[in-house]
Image (spheres, helix red, strand yellow):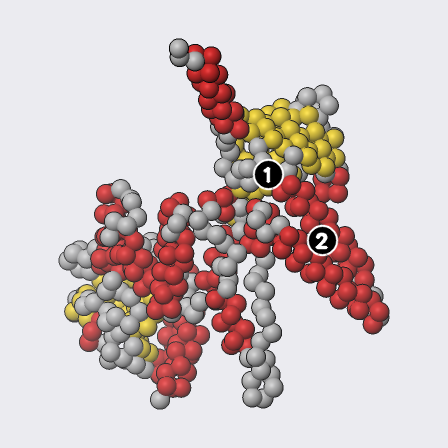
Amino acid sequence: MRDYTRTYLLLLLAVFGLFSSAYSQGYRIEATIKGFRDSSFVIGHYNRNATQFVPKDTAKADANGKVVFEGKTALPGGLYVILFPGNQKMIELIYSGKENNIALEADSADVNTSIKITGSKENELFYNYRKELAKGSKEIEALSKQTTPEAQARIRTIQEGFGTYRKKLLTENAGTFTSQLLKMSADPEIPTAPKLANGKTDSMWVFNYYKAHYWDAFDFTDPRIVNTPFFEPKIERYFKNLVVQVPDSIIKDADLIVKKVSPNKDLKAWTVFYITNQYENPKTVGTEAVWVYMANKYYLSGEMGVSDDVKKRIAEKVATMKDLLVNKTFPALTLTDPAGKKVSVQTIDANYTVLFFFAPTCGHCKEASPVLKAFYDKNKANGIKVMTISTEHNIEEWKSFVKTYHLEELINGYDALNQIDFNRKFDVVTTPTIYILDKNKKIIARKMPVEQLEDFLNYYQNKMARKL
């Protein structure tokens, strides 16, 4: 005879197990906050930096200041924030994704010292760390007002003590999300550097070690790291301070970082976008080549999924930019001067040629023109020539502009046949746009502000002289 009772019991246990598993995937975060009642709160997490906030839930506190956030669907792990009414204050909360039932109490007057947490080892570690740090910082602040050797010695003792405390906490809690976050927020520790022959520390070794271990604390297979405020400041600092700002170096590091973050699809997409965006209109002369490389490799190749419309716009931009990069020969450009004669960029005999694309009706161009004229007057004896190029097609306005700003001595060009698309052909998106060419009409700078012309050319000529 079949054992129906046993079968029923096993089925019941299986259903109960599924129910328990589903329930455990939900979350409940209970906060009792002194100083607030009948008020609405928002909980959410950071996204890559400290200014991007992703709200996940809202709840209203009762008359005792108790507020409960709960749901049946799991929250993504990350560093969370409970925003107070008016967004004036907040409580940071580590949500690992493994501790789904957390309770806390805090006084809104001083959250960090008053907070008490149950149901979360992660947050106990987090706030104990913060309290220890605050205690040491407060004592150091008081001691720093003293100049005695004893005060300085005490400061060193506090710093060394906190370092020991931090190392112990990280070692004993190596598998926690809190430990991972604390490591991500700090610089890599650098061991004692070797000495040079003169007895000084090898600073290049220190730099190379620091750069090589910069990302050690980031586990890019862990999707939770996106929901913290650490990644974007780190990548910004990396490219700004640790990468030589020449295209080859930037491209090499760009590919390296994209490869590192590739296990995380969303983070990879954002990283490619971030790097590409930084070099479309870069602050460092000549690095637009990075934008062209990133656009070709990651977007036009299809590696990054974008719409056909976006891909088309990127392809058009690449087609424009590829011939206008630093070290490329400036494309042929022939115009008409005020006397009706043809003038060509390629036939200008000069050590350096400055091309000033402007619109006669442009306010910024009117402000820049006197600066341009002063630059020319000061430097024309050094073999520097300036060609102004009108991007608009009203001949009377063009001639009036040249006369008004006393530019007659410069080379002035006008598209008399109205055939040139200055945007697509020469990347003149805004006016004024300036290019600097060397004797052979090779581009040495582009999108240069008129105020920086003289400083740049002095720097460039000195750089060339050092190579001779």
Give me the residue at 49% from left, 27% from top: 21
Which numbered disc covers residue 61?
none
The quadrant holding residue 198 is bottom right
Pointer 1 residue? 81
Q: Closer to the observer: label 1 or label 2?
A: 2
**Residue at the spot x=69%, y=61% of the render?**
163
Please tell me which residue is depicted at 43% across the width and 70% down the height of the picture: 244
Coordinates of residue 287 in the picture (x, y in percent): 36, 65
**Is residue 235 visible to the viewer in this orientation of the structure?**
yes
Question: Badge 2, how many Cα within 10 Å: few under 14, some, many 20+?
Answer: some
Q: Which amino acid does label 1 sit on?
A: Val
Where in the figure is residue 347, as x and y percent of width and height? 19, 76
Q: Quadrant of the N terminus?
A: top left
The front one of 253 and 86 is 253
Q: Residues within 10 Å of mark 1 (few under 14, many from 20)?
A: many
User: Mark on residue 133?
Assistant: 2
Residue 346 in percent (x, y) is at: 20, 73
Direction from residue 1 to residue 118 in the image, left or right: right
Query: Is 53 above or below relative to 282?
Result: above
SS class, disc 2: helix
Distance between the alpha carbons at the discs numbered 1 and 2: 20 Å
Q: Is residue 394 visible?
A: no
- The residue positioned farthest toward the front in the image shown: 1
Label 1 or label 2, whichever comes before in sequence order: 1
Depicted 180 relative to depicted 378: above or below: above
Q: What element does badge 1 sit on?
A: strand
At x 83%, y 72%, the residue is 149
